[in-house]
Every structure is written in structure tokens, then in C-alpha cells.
Amino acid sequence: MLSDAQRLSAAHLLRNAERNRAPIDPLTTVFPGIDVVDAYEIALLNIRARLAAGETVYGHKVGLSSEVMQKMMGVDEPDYGHLLSSMVYAEGTPIDTARFCYPRIEVEIGYVLGETLPGEGCTETDVLAATEYIVPSIELIDSRITDWKIGLADTIADNASSAGVILGAGRVEPANVDIGAISAVLFQGEEEIARGEASAVLGNPTKAVAWLARKVASFGVRLEAGHVILPGSCTRAIDARPGDVFRADFSDIGSVSVEFK
């Protein structure tokens, strides 16, 4: 476990890396004693600083929500990060890749909450009851760690590699669709480059949202009415480069697109 001074130093390194688009060595190398608790506290230091500077919480995201990713990281549960107001991008407006270190996209079902979720003890039933609608979404991820050479503590401290979110126009109430059966196809231009199933996310992405509500409660955080929750990707992550145009088509809930410059 790190000291408070080391946690603050790590937070500054990550914040400067993001601000200057200058990736740093893994925190697991710089601070060999870092653990998961340290990593979450480092992430929260930077989130609190950004909130104090005027940003607001737009929602949260779940990472490492597939069995494959958990095995790769040697963990048995996901991780999470915050989505802030500065991370929201609109369809039809090209995103400048120069704003990021190593941008990638992931295809996800977004949950828009109509009511605040309970914390400890939150169930999938609670999530479905509180969700106003689900939406097609693309998450933009990035790593402030050089060449994505990350361990578990690195990605957690780096706000779960969060960078942005793009929501499509589709709006579907949970009662009107079998969320676990939704599939997604990702196109780059007119070429299909990936496809996946919502069930890749812990068997059903609703399960990931319930896990998140319970997890963040231990850090004094709530998933509130109006928040957008990204439960994890239906597909593998894809690098984003200038000129790339992506479209994700979801069964039953519509599509979402993003363009990079």
C-alpha cells in the first residue's frame, strides 16, 4: 500500500500525462507497492480535482467485464471509472485524435437512469426498474500509460482508461427488449470489423450495472438519476486513427456512429 504522498504523486503523473498527451511508465513500475485500493484512491483524487474545477459527473463505466479480460488481468471482478461532462461527444462532430494518447473505441449498451440506484445490495431487478431507457453507445477509451502496457492497478488509477462516450439516437425501455440477447456489429466505413453479443458482459450487462452500484457504494459514490452507465463492451477494442469512421448497429435498439480527424 502506498502513502498519501505517493498516491498524490501518482495522481499528478496521470493528470499531467492526460493534459500534455505524454504517456508515462506504468504506475506498477514507478510505485511497486501499489494495490487496487491505492489505484481507486488515485483515480478519485483526479476526479475530485476535475469536479472542483467545474466538471460534472455524467455517469460511470465498467471495465474488465468479460471473462477473457478478467483472466488476462488475473482478477475475478470488473473495475470502474467515471464519465465526466468533458467526455461527452455528439454524433456527427469529428473527434480530434490529437486530444488523446492511444485512442480506441468499444461498442456498448448504455443505461440511462431515471432513478438513483441503491448501493449495497443493488440487484438486477433494481437496475431494470431504475433505468429509463437503454441506448446504443460507443465508448472512447485511452491509456495515459505508454503503449497500453497496463496492469490492473494502472488501468484503475487511470480512471479505468476512460476517455469519452457517444450515444446514438435510439431509446428503448428495458421492459420492451431482452437486453441479454442484443447483438452488435461494428463497421469501419462499409466493412464489418467486429461483432459481439451483450451476453459477453458478465452474461448480461444489467448484471454489470448492479455490480457497479454495489462497488462504488464502498467509495461513497452513488449511481444517480440522469447518469449514463456503460456496462462493458460487446466487442474487442479497436484503435481509432484520423479519418476513421465507425458505425455500430445493435439489434432492437438502433445504431451509433463516430468519426475521427
Image: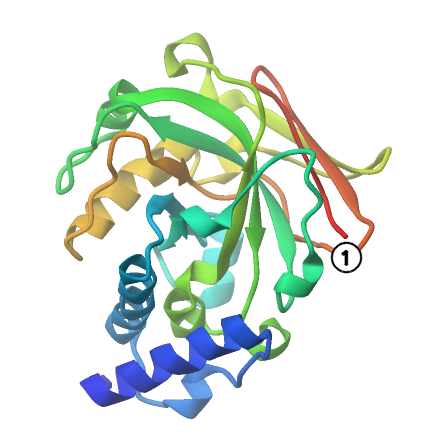
Circle 1 packing at 10 Å, graded few (<14), some (14-19), many (20+), is some
Under mark 1, the amino acid is Arg
Spot the residue most to the front.
54
- Residue depicted at x 69% and y 34%: 92
The residue singled out by tag 1 in the image is 241
**Relative to residue 222, is residue 113 drawn left or right?**
right
Q: Which of 80 and 73 is in front in this view?
A: 80
Q: What residue do we see at 49% from left, 82% from top?
A: 26
Give x and y (percent) for residue 46.
33, 68
How many marks are shown on the rendered structure?
1
Whether residue 204 is visible to the viewer of this picture, yes or no, is: no
Q: How is the structure coloured here?
A: rainbow
Seen at 50% across and 25% down, the residue is 135
| Most distant residue in the top direction | 176
Quadrant containing the N terminus in the rendered view: bottom left
Asked if residue 241 lies left or right of residue 253, the reply is right
Residue 33 position in % (x across, y down): 30, 88
Q: In this view, does 165 lie above or below 175?
A: below
- The extreme right residue here reads 190
Quarter location, residue 166? top right
Label 1 element class: loop
List x then y, in percent, for residue 228.
39, 36
* Near-viewer residue (33 or 229): 229
Q: Nearer the viewer, residue 105 or 67?
A: 105
| Quarter of the view holding residue 54 | bottom left
Q: Position of residue 62 (x, y in %)?
A: 40, 48
Above or below for 68 versus 213: below
* Camera sees residue 217: yes
- Is 58 placed above or below 199 here? below
Q: Quadrant of residue 113?
A: top left
